[in-house]
Amino acid sequence: MKLSKFALAALATLTLATFAFAEGQKDAGSAAAPAAVKPIVLRLAETHPVDYPTTKGDMKFAELVKERTGGRIVIEVYPGSQLGQEKAVIEQVQFGAIDFTRVSVSPLAAFVKLFDTLQLPYLYRSEDHMWKVLLGPIGKELFASLEPANFIGIGWFEPGARNFYNSKRPVSKPEDLAGLKIRVQESELMVGLVSAFGAVATPMPYGEVYSGLQTGVIDGAENNWPSYESTSHFEVAKYYTLDEHTRVPEIIIGSKISLQKLSAEDQAIIKQAALDAIPYQRQLWAEREKASEAKVRAGGSIITKIDDKAPWQARMQVLYAKQSNEIQALIKRINEVK
Ligand code: BDP
């Protein structure tokens, strides 16, 4: 085949261009090659089901991290206790086998005692007071106190107020709790709290409470409206007393072992994302509290309102008296938060 001069020149240019393009590709390949980088996948353990406000808050946190790292860091949320019950999960976070968890500070206090402060009965004047404490200097100091135990404090979520419920009788004054077997979280302080009311405290993982109530191993438990409803405990323990003895903050913690593998910038993105997920979770919480209350009332629970909490608070003085000097000092500072 005979090619014209013009065709030969065109062919040479094309060959050169192809060569140059291939070289360019090689260069790009040896540099960052962003498209080929696999994301860092981290796991977050959550006790509650997929539609629960804390789980949705976790998902918002994960979504913000993914967005702000351009997909380099992916946090997979495992709801419904798929990775275990809270105490076992916290242990795994400590050893770096699970990267994050959202838990109640109640079982966390078994690992870092100072956290008992946050779950003391009638500690906060209101939900607002609690949030001022958590988002202010005290919250930051508490996060820092987690590090020696290999945890990193990441964020807080709204927990609502916890109330007693049981399958035996209406409870309208502290004396009515006497002798009832009440499930508590795996927390020494909660055992002390329930005992101070004259009830028999039975520590047990959350996932075992329903069958415990059904079989009569326990007579009751205590929790907020959404948990009382979402677990169907209201179907087997219909007496619910609005004594609002505690607000036990929900917390997201990370594993120090996992997080220290990330750059300081990525760690900062993660912490900020958790803080930015808070308003979303609080909004969902407010909605769910109302919806849960409506469902529980429609389900036939007997609700006892407590107008005067003074006799309930008075019973808790023994518990306050037992706290260490460090905790006493923190309580004083919490009381001073305006
Ligand atoms: C719920 C908390 C959850 C706890 C549970 C419990 O959100 O983290 O596991 O109470 O009582 O309110 O164990």
Image (cartoon, helix red, strand yellow):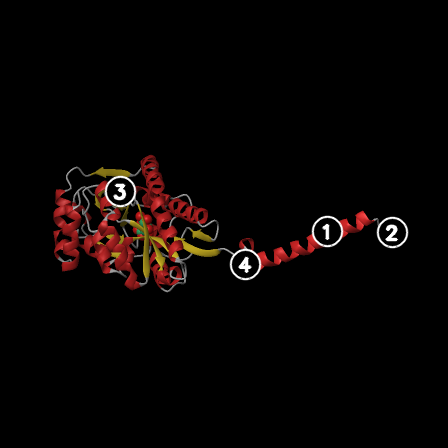
- Is the CB–ligand 1 distance for label 3 below 8 Å? no
In the image, which is nearer the foreground, mark 1 or mark 3? 1
Of 102 and 24, the residue lying toward us: 24
Residue sitting at the far front: 5
- Work out how far the residue at label 3 is from the one at label 2, CA to CA, in angstroms: 98 Å
Of 318 and 274, the residue lying toward us: 274
In the image, which is nearer the foreground, mark 4 or mark 1? 1
Q: Which residue is mark 2?
A: 2
Residue at 23 percent across and 50 percent down: it is 137
Relative placement, left or right, of 90 versus 138 is: right
Q: Which residue is mark 4?
A: 31
Residue 238's spot in the image, x, y percent? 29, 42
Q: Secondary structure at mark 2?
A: loop
**Mark 2 or mark 1, which has the lower sequence index?**
2
- Quadrant into which the C terminus falls: top left
Instruction: Give the label on residue 154, or none.
Output: none
Query: Do labels 3 and 2 touch, CB within 8 Å?
Result: no
Residue 315's spot in the image, x, y percent? 13, 49
**Mark 1 or mark 3, which has the lower sequence index?**
1
Residue 108's spot in the image, x, y percent? 29, 57
Which amino acid type is shown beneath numbered disc 2?
Lys
Residue 289's spot in the image, x, y percent? 32, 39
Which amino acid type is shown beneath numbered disc 1?
Thr
In the image, which is nearer the foreground, mark 4 or mark 3? 4
In the image, which is nearer the foreground, mark 3 or mark 2? 2
Q: Which residue is mark 3?
A: 239
Relative placement, left or right, of 17 versus 220 is: right
